[in-house]
Amino acid sequence: MKLKIFTTCCLFSLLLCLTGQNATYGQVYSDKVVGKKNADVIDSLKAAPYPYALPIYGKKAAALGFNLPYSAGIGVNYLWQQSDLVINNLQVGFNYGPLHNVDEIIRFNNATSTASGWNIRPDIWLFPFLNVYGILAKASPSTAVDFGIYVPDADGNWSNVLSMNTKANFQASTLGFGLTPTIGVGGGWMALDVNFTWSDIAELEKPAFATVFGPRLGKSFKLKKPERNIALWVGGFRLHLNSGTTGSLQLNEVIDISGLQARVDNGIAKVGSSQQQVDTWWSGLTPVEQKNPVNMAKYETANRALDAAGTFLNGLDEALNDDKHATVQYSLDKRPKDMWNFIIGSQFQYNKHWMVRCEYGFLGSRKQVIAGLQYRFGL
């Protein structure tokens, strides 16, 4: 059974935010100048000595008529994002007790996860058609989730025995690197960005690893002043997160525990009542009816779910008795609900040193807004 977003999904919204930023960069590229009207520009590029050490083969590229960007840069980017996740094999425990699988009994009614953050992205053009960059990022997400514990009765109807609201906030730092092969001809360009990041989050046992792939196709339009242009592009954004995650949280940081004890007690009573109904129904069947595969499956499902719900609620009950130090441990497999979303973007280049850009991602279950400022210089 696949479940969308548990309490810890804000951690993964955070990862989406951090890794989403990693694809942001000033959209520059090595552009092959073409056309008779640009003959003077082509001649000047071929005749002028290339003054910088980078990129490697920069002199040869300039001699072939490529207009190269400055070979180094640093960008500052901001990103806001909302995302959904799919979680499998969800296991929960309390106060460092054993973990129990709760996939079958937890159902989510509503979940909204948001994240925002900043990153710094230094880069160099290693070759005329290959940009290499580093990633330093900080972000903080928040997630509000409504979910319930459900158990079946003797007729196979599932009912809610406890509803809960969770909200959690986290902080994280990210380090990583990326590569962007890109080329342009006559102002049209293509870029294939890929990056790899490790995010350090206190609530996770080890840094979370993610990979982003972002292909883009675009066109730059010259303005009246030299070096000034506007670029427009479309593309995609693909995010892959490592699937296994374990961690620990303070219970009172993710759940409002005021009045929770009474609701947990009520939930335990409902589980006991449902178990009694199931046992009464089963004992009322004849031996032949008990061997019926349909009845056997119903009975086994009910007992399995009721046992899981009872274990979860009793563990939560014990944790609430030590509310100041109560913790919840978890283990799960997760992935983005949609690995791909669509991107449109634009950039205003004031000159070859300064540029500002904005990008919007949408479609599917993820949407994001990116804004960035970049300064470039020669090395």
Image (tube, rainbow, N blue to C red):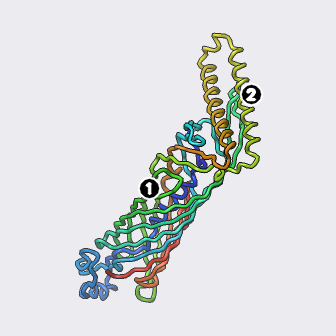
Q: Is mark 2 on a helix, strand or loop?
A: helix
Camera-side residue: 312 or 54? Answer: 312
> Residue 31: image x %, image y %?
34, 76
Q: In this view, does 46 lie above or below 94?
A: below
| Amino acid at the residue labelled 2 | Ser
| Amino acid at the residue labelled 1 | Ala
Camera-side residue: 31 or 328? Answer: 328
Camera-side residue: 306 or 192? Answer: 306
Q: Is residue 357 above or below residue 223?
A: above
**Visible residue check, residue 33:** no
Q: In which quarter of the image is residue 365?
A: bottom right
Instruction: Answer with left or right where residue 239 lies relative to residue 258.
Output: left
Q: In which quarter of the image is residue 284?
A: top right
> Residue 374: image x %, image y %?
45, 77
Camera-side residue: 223 or 97? Answer: 97
Q: In this view, does 37 lie above or below 6?
A: below
What is the spatial separation of the Cα atoms under label 2 and label 1, in whole angstroms?
45 Å
Residue in the picture at 59% in, 47% down: 4
Between circles 2 and 1, the one closer to the viewer is 2
**Visible residue check, residue 318:** yes
Q: What element carries label 1?
A: strand
Q: In which quarter of the image is residue 194?
A: bottom left
> Residue 70: image x %, image y %?
35, 80
Q: Residue 210 carries which label?
A: 1
Residue in the picture at 26% in, 88% down: 48
Marked residue nearer the N-terminal end (2 or 1) = 1
Report the number of discs. Answer: 2
For the C terminus, the quadrant is: bottom left
Q: Name the residue under label 2.
A: 273
